[in-house]
Image (cartoon, rainbow, N blue to C red):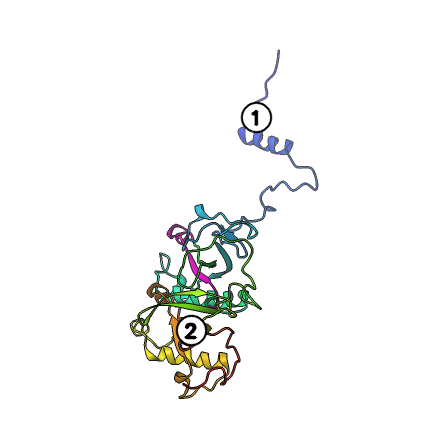
């Protein structure tokens, strides 16, 4: 006859645990040595890459960067971060806001460093790209500084190009604004055609003046302060005295930002000297008073 031995439930558990005891030296706790998972981080775009298009909102689904050696329309030269009050909103900053102007100012400084000169002194266009609303809700606080080549100062269409723009405004840069032949419509300039400085021309680029302390309305009306600012650049460029005789040596033409660019913080005015009484066949850089006599 078989005999069955009855064991209390607690004793069964004790026996089971004793039977499954870990060998000496083995850590039976499988969780205490796993590193904690890192907190998820929002996507941040890369600098030093190029893009097939020129967006001003950074949708993750449209982020398809390419090597800058391939055909592209924009290059990210810097990626910055909005902080403090500029990053506190529940939606991305509006165009014309303090946050957008802060981003534009940082882009201007960093792009200047990458190019070797103010981007406005070349056939270039700057776009500040902000995260999409969905990305912002997910924690994205970056902004991209994208630069593009354009056809001319009169034609803002973006050029498909190859190669990086880094250092593009150093030395004898092909993208740098230089000598120009204007087309006139009465007393207004209707177009500016770039020409070699050894060809006949009447206009030459002299620099970028910062129109601080002006309203856009006054700038758009051609406030004389803009011409005075451009004339000071003209004097420095040509090496003539910046005095009361300067308006009788040469005239000035300026191109100002669009109203949207102005709201976003762009205050850079492109300044040109204008000699209307004779054609020029050389650059007037450092030419001195004899090349620009008082008339």
Give the magenta part as a residue range. 121-138
Q: Quadrant of the C terminus?
A: bottom left
Question: In this view, which residue lies farthest toward the right?
Answer: 24
> Which one is nearer the viewer's eye here, 97 or 186?
186
Q: Earlier in the sequence, mark 2 or mark 1?
A: 1
Q: Picture coordinates of residue 88 (x, y %)?
A: 38, 61
User: Looking at the image, which residue is at 54% across and 28% down?
Assistant: 8
The residue identified by callout 2 is 271
Q: Which residue is mark 1?
A: 7
Q: Secondary structure at mark 2?
A: strand
Q: Residue 266 falls in which quadrant of the image?
A: bottom left
Q: Which mark is residue 75?
A: none
Residue at (37% x, 77% y) in the render = 226
Image position, residue 34 (x, y; %): 59, 46
Q: Nearer the viewer, residue 100 or 66?
A: 66
Q: Is residue 124 magenta?
A: yes
Nearer the viewer's eye, disc 2 or disc 1?
Answer: 2
The percent coordinates of residue 80 (x first, y second) are 48, 61
Quadrant holding the N terminus: top right
Q: Quadrant of residue 26?
A: top right
Secondary element at image label 1: loop
> Residue at point 52% right, 54% down?
46
């Amino acid at each position: 006859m078989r005999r069955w031995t009855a064991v209390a439930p607690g004793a069964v558990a004790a026996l089971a645990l004793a039977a499954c005891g870990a060998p000496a030296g083995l850590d039976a706790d499988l969780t205490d040595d796993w590193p904690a998972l890192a907190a998820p981080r929002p996507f941040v775009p890369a600098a030093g890459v190029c893009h097939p298009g020129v967006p001003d909102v950074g949708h993750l689904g449209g982020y398809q960067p390419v090597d800058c050696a391939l055909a592209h329309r924009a290059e990210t030269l810097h990626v910055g971060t909005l902080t403090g009050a500029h990053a506190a909103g529940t939606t991305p900053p509006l165009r014309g806001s303090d946050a957008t102007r802060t981003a534009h100012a940082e882009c201007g400084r960093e792009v200047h460093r990458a190019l070797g000169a103010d981007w406005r002194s070349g056939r270039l266009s700057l776009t500040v790209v902000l995260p999409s609303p969905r990305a912002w809700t997910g924690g994205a606080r970056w902004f991209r500084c994208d630069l593009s080549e354009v056809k001319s100062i009169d034609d803002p269409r973006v050029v498909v190009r190859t190669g990086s723009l880094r250092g593009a405004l150093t030395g004898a840069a092909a993208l740098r604004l230089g000598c120009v032949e204007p087309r006139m419509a009465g007393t207004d300039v209707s177009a500016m055609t770039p020409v070699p400085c050894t060809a006949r021309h009447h206009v030459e680029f002299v620099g970028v003046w910062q129109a601080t302390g002006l309203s856009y309305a006054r700038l758009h009306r051609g406030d004389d302060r803009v011409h005075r600012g451009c004339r000071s650049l003209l004097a420095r460029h040509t090496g003539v005295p910046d005095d009361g005789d300067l308006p009788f040596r040469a005239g000035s033409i300026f191109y100002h930002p669009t109203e949207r660019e102005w709201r976003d913080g762009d205050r850079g005015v492109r300044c040109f000297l204008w000699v209307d009484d004779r054609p020029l066949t050389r650059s007037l850089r450092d030419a001195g008073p004899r090349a620009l006599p008082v008339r």
